[in-house]
Amino acid sequence: MGNALVLHSWVVAMSRSGDTAAGSLGPGLRNPYSVLPDWLYPTFVVVALSAFSLYAAWVVLFFPNGRAGPYLSPFTSPEIHVTVAGFAIPTGIWIFWVPLLFRATCYYYRKALFRGFLGDPRSCAASEGRGGPYHGETRLLVFNNLHRFIFYLTTAQVVVLWYDTIAAFVYQGAPHLGIGNALMLVNVVCLSAYTFGCHAFRHLAGGGLDCFSCHRVRFQLWRGVTVLNVRHDRWAWVSMFTVWGVDLYIRLLILGVIPAAAWV
Ligand code: FES
């Protein structure tokens, strides 16, 4: 504890001393939290989120459905088919905004977005790049408060994804087991770990209680959420890549790149 306080004081002192240029550690200074270069994390955030966003937009806008045999892409679940003047509205249009808003307002992703896209600050030990006063998440950013409400919609979506995953084990009336089943299962487990490790859910489970021993169920739930919450950032990334991976696999089946007859 004492060492942590000394370290924190040192970081604060260095960031206030003027030795650090905006968004950098300055010559001769090293990030005490990591041996990695301080530009690596924000660069990874920008590259990974930009690539995923472009891929998601391509899928949502240009594919009317995401089903290949027993498998259903998370981008198009639940399946909602609407045709207007002979034109099939892409299924993903109806639901993409739920995970988008959930992740955009996620407490962890806010940090990643601020650091990656705005450099504000670029890393833990780098100074703020902004010159004006700090306004917190007010004004336009007040929409982040929607997060706790979007959590409910996301929970419903995760339940539907569990249904899809279990349903994929049966195809045309017979039991089915393929690579797609394994991918869908891994994906929904990772998505569940991310969703139910949410800070807002943790508060729902155990927040506002003065006496944990008086509320055993909520206390146990809070402990469970806390286990997931400790690694919330990791689950955020892993679940994003599993969504990406499972959709890519199903997309390749739909496009015929992977032979569909075997429903592998
Ligand atoms: Fe990240 Fe809620 S805080 S999902």
Image (cartoon, helix red, strand yellow):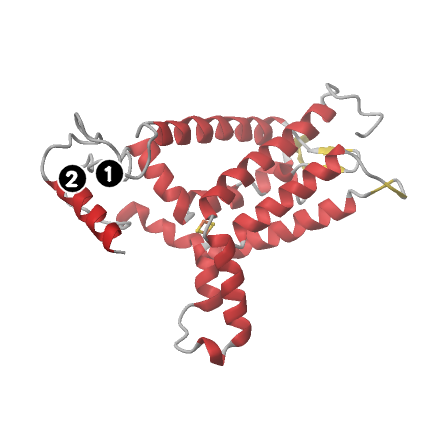
Is residue 81 among what the camera can see? no
Q: Residue at x 59, y 37 (%)?
A: 243
- Can residue 255 be seen from the camera position used here? yes
Q: Residue furthest left?
A: 17
Q: Is residue 5 above or below residue 93?
A: below
Instruction: Please state, as top left, top right, bottom left or bottom right, where the N terminus lies in the image.
Output: bottom left
**Quarter of the image with the C terminus in it:** top right
Q: Which residue is mark 1?
A: 125
Residue type (three-letter) at the residue carrying disc 1: Ala
Element under label 2? Answer: helix
Q: Which mark is residue 242?
A: none
> What residue is at 61 percent from the left and 50 percent from the top?
157
| In the foreground, 121 or 63 | 121
Q: Earlier in the sequence, mark 1 or mark 2?
A: 2
Residue labelled with disc 2: 15
Q: For mark 1, give the secondary structure.
A: loop
Instruction: Determine whether the beta carbon of the residue marked 1 sits less than 8 angstroms from the nearest atom of ligand 1.
Output: no
Which percent across, then down, holds residue 8? 22, 48
Label 2 crowd bin: few (<14), some (14–19), many (20+), radius 10 Å: many
What amino acid is at disc 2?
Answer: Ser
Q: Picture quarter containing residue 60?
A: top right
